[in-house]
Amino acid sequence: MQRSSKEAKTKSKNELLPGTLEMLILKTLSIEPMHGYGIAQHIQMISADVLTVEEGSLYPALQRMLVKGWVSAEWRISANNRRARFYTLTTAGKKQLGVEEARFSQMFGAMMRVMKTT
Amino acid sequence: MGSVLRRLLFFFRQSQFDRDMEDELRFHEEMKAQALADADDMSGDEARAAARRRIGNALRLREQAREPWTFAPVETFAADARHALRLMRRDPAFTFTALATLALGIGLNTAIFSVAYGVLWRPLPYPNPDRLIIVSSAQQTETGPRTFSTWAPMSYDALHPRVTTLDRLAAYNSIDVPLSGRGEPLQLHGLEVSPNFFETLGVPPARGRAFLTGAAAPDDDRSAMVSDRLWRTSLKADPAIVGQSITIDGLARTVIGVLPPEFSFRPVIPGLGALAETDIFLPNRWPGDTGRNAFLFLLGRMKPGVTQERAEAELTALANDSSVVSAGALGAEGALAQNVHTLARVAGLQQYGTESVRTLLLILLGAVSFVLLIACVNVANLQMARLSARRAELSVRMALGAGRRRIMHQLLTEAAVLSLLGGSLGVVLAEIAIHVTLPLVPQFALPRLGGIVIDARVMAFCLGLSLVSTLLIGLLPALRVSGAAFGEDLALHAGEARTTGDRQGERLRTLLVAAQIAMTLVLLIGAGLLIHSFARLTSVSPGFESSGRDGVVQAVRVTLPERLYDTPERIHAFARGVLDRIQYLPGVKSASLINSAPFGMMFIRGDFDIEGQPKPEIDAGKPKIEAGYFKTMGIPLLAGREFTAQDTAKAPKVAIISERIARQYFPGGPGAALGRRVRLRDRGQWLTVVGVVADIRQMGLDQEVQPMIYVPFQQERESFVLCFVSFVARTATPASVVEGMSAEIRRAASDLPIESAVTMDEAVAASVAPPRFRTLLLALFAMTATLIATCGIYGLMAYAVTQRRREIGVRMALGAERRDVLRLVLRRALGIVAAGLIAGLAGAAGVTRVLQTFLFGVTPTDPITFAIVTLLLTAVGLIAAWLPARRATRIDPSAALRAE
């Protein structure tokens, strides 16, 4: 979502359903290992700015996933020669991604059926 | 689980985590700034500022990022605990009082528990100790079943090969034998044991070997096994001791084994208590003994799966099977009855003989838990007082969003911190208390003294107590907070709040203090009953004059070994020889001897006959004394004469009887018995009564007087009753006289150890040592409780006065005198105390009956004790309220009215 740089207020964004943020992060990382900023950028880009991930949500989510063992983290040199923390999907994380995807499709399908009724 | 482990690791990496987070956010910020700079064409600084704004509150972000890593309950508890410690530090008076109170309460409980556990419940130091049993016997008589503790060796010989429910059956007999040739001659506490004794216990020796068992094994009868303690002391921890010879009772014996250091066996004699630790074990098979010389305790090990009932049944059947056990050989103390059905009684080794100790310890545990309750109530009250003071602050916090639950958690955490700290101090206190008190415990009172130690189990108990205290202390304040009324009246009557005070809280605290007083009263009454009983006991005269104008009676006891003193003539000569010399020692007013001194260890009693009368139903003691005994002991002669030097072995056989026998069987005045004849055994010689003396108590002040028939020492021919000799001397200088007596004995028999050398005063005092000890203990608890309760009353009244300053100020302004104010406060205190006393009296009336067995001459509801204690506690309560009352009188009315 484009915002004027002068605005500093809190954002009115499309709020993500709880839990889906983690699913999106997992999916993103299934492409390749990334650092936090990269993950946020990726989601924003691919969703054509519909979905914005706030730092306040992103990093706690990443830490939660670290605790649960779905991702692992290590410090590497980024593309522009800066030191950054890269997150990688673990085997458990891959499995979790499958679980979340399935659950999401099921829910989505159900909602669609409700909405399609005339 | 993986996540738990990772979280635990986090605990150690916190600072690293913070650094990483900071770096990560900085990176993100820089990237964002770059993007903004590129997109919106901002300057570097502007971009950074914008980026930072977008990211938002970094601190909050970091906190949120931390959250998944923490164990929420632990973090909360840690934070609350730190807060509690801070609060405690700010209020040292409260902290000190609370911790001291809790330490006392928990410490005393831990100490008593460790004693009770060590004595009653700690598993004995043998393998599978619950399989070990003691077998005693009982016989049905007309007056009911009579239990004997011991068996004749012939019965043991018959039983042990045939019993199938027991793996092994061993026998032992307590003996005291002198050790000589290794420094100072020493009287050892020992056991004669059957060769399979150590196999039955399951304890192999640390050095050497145990006795040989098995039917074909050669007799080990010149061998001995020694305890680790004896080895280290008298045998100088000689590493080559196995195979060496030591002299026991004049005989050379070979040491074949040394027992491990943790081995312990203290035989328990029912009615007497636990004997001293056994130092030497001698093997014996008691060939052909029908029960005249040895009285055996039977120790068995039940086979796995066998119950005590089954073993009892089998042993009873065997004992009554005349093909197994020849009738008349079923030995026990005293006469044997033929054709009488015998019951075997089986008791676990650990429980055997501990019934009275068990009762006492359970009573003490109960008493001491009262003390803990009282202590917890005090601390709870203090907490609630603090809570009342913080009401304003807490209400504000709740209004600002702190959940009620959070505050309750906080209060419980505070209580937990207090209790755990108090508990730790309590453990230290318990350790000290045990170290100081155990040496003072009277000799036979507690078996397994060595097992009393503060170990993991006891600590766990202590921890449990701390948690219970936490609940008791924390629950009430927490509940008050959760109550709807808390804090709400503040919101409505903000200004008045501090003046009207916390009514509900105060009511609750008053109730608690009344409960404290009730419990304290119960304890005080218990202690008072014991004190009263002890006073009655010690006022009983033993019948002899243990101390008087002429000094005290010093007694020195020896046991003559059978080997060297096998004829009565030898014993007579020894006794006479030493006594003649003792009589001329400086400081000796008179001297004599007896074979069974009062308040001593040994006493023989049996039936007797009177010429021309049917056989008396009572038993008489049959002591053997030398001339001058009654004069030395201060026992009044009521008729006739004392024995003299003329009553020799060749002279006519005489006797002196005691008053009880004279009164019952020779009515018509004390002289009526003179000239009549009695005899001490069936078909024995008739003895002419030449004197009547007053009765004495032989075994204890709480016993009845013992009827006696005294016989001259020189006229007794049975060596085995003569070998115990107690020399007695009346002197004003017992210390030097005892030296002289010992010297004379050593002169006559160089290897003879002195078994005991005490004055009769000391012997009597020792006999009342157990009741004295009990009384002291319970009195200590009662005083501790009183102290704590006094603090409780004081605290409550002090707070009440502070809360009512305004009201008191008003009264004074309206004309009340200081005297009236004083009376007001004291009356209120009296009311609370009275309520507590009534509840306490009711409780005491019901509870004190558990003390029944320990009371002498006093009923459990003795009105004198009840009355005195109640008055005492009332006075204490009023004194406790005195200081706050005085402070109330000093209130300046104008200041009180002005202030809020």
Image (cartoon, rainbow, N blue to C red):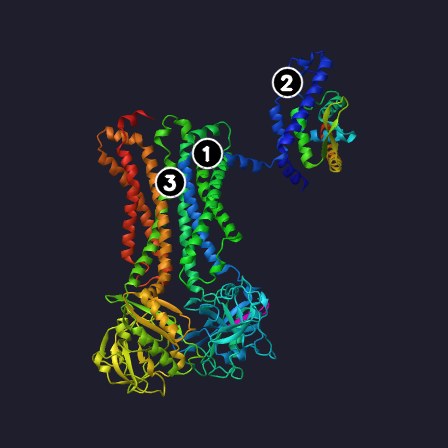
Secondary structure category for the residue under label 1: helix
C-alpha distance separating marks 1 and 2: 39 Å
User: What's under tag 1, amino acid-wise?
Assistant: Leu
Q: Can residue B701 be seen here? A: no
Q: Quadrant of the N terminus of chain B?
A: top right
Q: Residue at x 71, y 14 (%)?
A: B37
Q: Does label 1 or label 3 sit earlier along the sequence?
A: 1
Q: Chain of mark 1?
A: B
Q: Chain of mark 3?
A: B
The prevailing secondary structure element of the residues shown in magenta is strand
Q: Which residue is mark 1?
A: B87
Report the span colored magenta.
B297-306
Secondary structure category for the residue under label 2: helix
User: What's under tag 2, amino acid-wise?
Assistant: Arg
In this picture, is B5 found above or below B273? above
Circles 1 and 3: CB atoms closer than 8 Å: no
Residue density around tag 2, few if under 14, some if 14–19, many if 20 or more, within 10 Å = some
Give the x, y percent position of residue B253: 53, 74
Q: Residue at x 36, y 51 (%)?
A: B782
Quarter of the view holding residue B223: bottom right
| Furthest residue toward right | A31
Secondary structure category for the residue under label 3: helix
Q: Which residue is mark 3?
A: B509
Q: Does label 2 or label 3 sit earlier along the sequence?
A: 2
